[in-house]
Amino acid sequence: MNIPLVFWLVPIASIVALAMAWFFFTQMKKEDEGTPRMREIAEHVRKGAMAYLKQQYKVVLIVFIVLAVIFAIMAYGFQMQNPWVPFAFLTGGFFSGLAGFFGMKTATYASARTANAARNSLNSGLRVAFRSGAVMGLVVVGLGLLDIALWFIILQAAGVTKLVTITTTMLTFGMGASTQALFARVGGGIYTKAADVGADIVGKVEADIPEDDPRNPATIADNVGDNVGDVAGMGADLYESYCGSILSTAALGATAFAMNGELQLKAVIAPMLIAAVGIFLSLAGIFLVRTKEGATMKDLLKSLSLGTNTSAALIAVASFAILYFLQIENWLGIGFSVITGLAAGVIIGQATEYYTSHSYKPTQEISASSQTGAATVIIKGIGTGMISTMIPVVTISVAIMLSYLCANGFQMEMTAANLSTGLYGIGIAAVGMLSTLGITLATDAYGPIADNAGGNAEMSELGEEVRHRTDALDALGNTTAATGKGFAIGSAALTALALLASYIEEIKEAIARVGKMDILAQIQDIPSFMDYFQVNLMNPKVIVGVFIGAMAAFLFSGITMGAVGRAAQTMVEEVRRQFREIAGILEGKATPDYGRCVEISTRSAQHEMILPSLLAIIIPIVVGLVLGVAGVLGLLVGGLAAGFTLAVFMANAGGAWDNAKKMVEEGNFGGKGSDCHKATIVGDTVGDPFKDTSGPSLNILIKLMSMVSIVMAGLTVFFL
């Protein structure tokens, strides 16, 4: 099988993305880091972030070595897996970790430079922060496509000729990416929220000092946490979403068009080409982002929207051109499936913005509820978060149906052919949603950079005008971060659904590997597969699997929330101790022990991230051994439905609480230091683990459970 010439656009695009990321990084490094005090604070944050990441990677390395050995035994000792699986798994984790590392390194260099640029103008600060965030976006898509292209080339060079085998093997590096992402998200989330909650409760509520005040011992740890959680964690998270959507769609294409070898190859490389073109169009959007001095929140949002929406519109047109050029069967319908995914991403982003930005009624009402205390702030925030799930859930539901129908020519009959092409449409809708990830992730990574810039400006005691500009950039970052989380969760839902179909294909591959050809003959298509394994709602194994999947989402959230609570409690006690025992801190005459708070966050995150991360790996394995294939499919459906809805609720409620506090801090309802302000701080403190730990980690959970099920399909089949 010859690799078509057009395929080489994929590695070329990945190299261009990495080259532009390097260009933006070097341009940012040329910016002045500001005063000696600004440089000192940035260096503290940089050292803390790198120390944490180094410690985290040590723990993750042990887990990866153990899992790789298990996979090797399964592959070479019992022939339960493809022999390439252990290597693919390791590269997925390596590239995912590398993406987070580069993004975080950039962010820690960019924060002081953003604050210093804001001394000149709002547009200067926005440009430095956004293009530094673009490094994260471009590194993620560049490394992701490079990993995919390399494996596609390596497997063919090694003599693997069957496209279904190639694509299902490539899917397994998604488990490595998902495992690394979960550790990064959970560990980073615990780290940042332990510091944030500790800093807010003691500093802002009890001691009545401003946010990011240098007198607060937890403030450096808080700024470090923004980087390890919201940059390294988010980068690893979206890396595995991006790769998972492309790989699952490629696997579905290999199945849907298996009867025509030439068409099958085109269907496999189509999602890769759409992602490759998306890189070039994301770059075009990045250069469009700019604003004017004195811009309002809506003006700033319009600046970012111009870049993201332009990229989305261009990729919509380009997708039709790519599919037509490849002459894929029903290219027009599949093109509309891509549009469906893009539209769903935009709608979810806009809905998230509506429910979390203080420019709109829901968050304004949460701020107003602070007039009657913290309890009503929490009640109103929870209610708003619950209501906010409606639009994303309906949007994803409509997107699933439309993308399915567009791809199979609006054929409602559930034949084997219609199911295969329809599922390919759903997968390519996920690719469409993530095709402009280069700029979408830039808007997300921008948030923590702007937040750190504000902290640096406060601790460096820059002028009121500079702080006003960094506050505007920070408030925008809160909204873009919330929008990014909604986008990540939405893409996870489509990707996880595509992975369900990929699980079926991997089960068939595993059955062939272990030599159970009599079974394989009975499950050649999806309907016969479902009949053989009795995957229907009357099978108690499926129902039990659904319940366990739904429970897993809540269990995972509860454990991670509890972890943040325990870590935050330790942090609160430490900050109180320092205020009590180190004379002169509150008067600004003594320097707090910042290192002790960084150490507490690091130790707590390393200890607490292990249990929830391992649960995501263990649960699918146990369900597969006890309930078989039917139980696993039920598990994945239950986890997807409950996890998606719960993640949207938690992310939006947390984002709304955060911006409700920001609205009061702008002078509404008494402003900073008022009773209303303290009430919204309590709401924001409750929302911190919602939006930055448990909520965003759930989208990784639902994909990791799917990936583990795919990789462990051989073990499930072995005991049939």
Image (cartoon, rainbow, N blue to C red):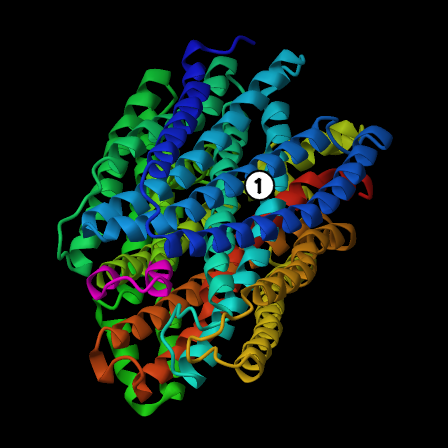
Which image quadrant for residue 469? Answer: bottom left
Q: Is residue 356 above or below residue 232?
A: below
Q: Position of residue 498 (x, y in %)?
A: 51, 41
Residue sitting nearer the eye, 483 or 23: 23
Return the residue at label 1: 97
Residue occupying the far right of the picture: 77
> Can the viewer see residue 460?
yes
Secondary structure that dominates the magenta span = helix
* Region of the chain picked out in magenta, as a range: 454-467
Query: In this image, 675 relative to 464: left or right?
Result: right
Q: Is residue 81 above or below residue 54?
A: above
Residue sitting nearer the eye, 618 or 595: 595
Residue sitting nearer the eye, 190 or 55: 55
Query: In this image, 354 relative to 642: left or right?
Result: left
Residue occupying the far front of the picture: 589
Residue occupying the far bottom of the picture: 372
Q: Position of residue 623 (x, y in %)?
A: 72, 55
Q: Position of residue 543 (x, y in %)?
A: 63, 61
Determine the residue positioned at 23% across, 83% down: 669
The kind of residue tagged 1 is Gly
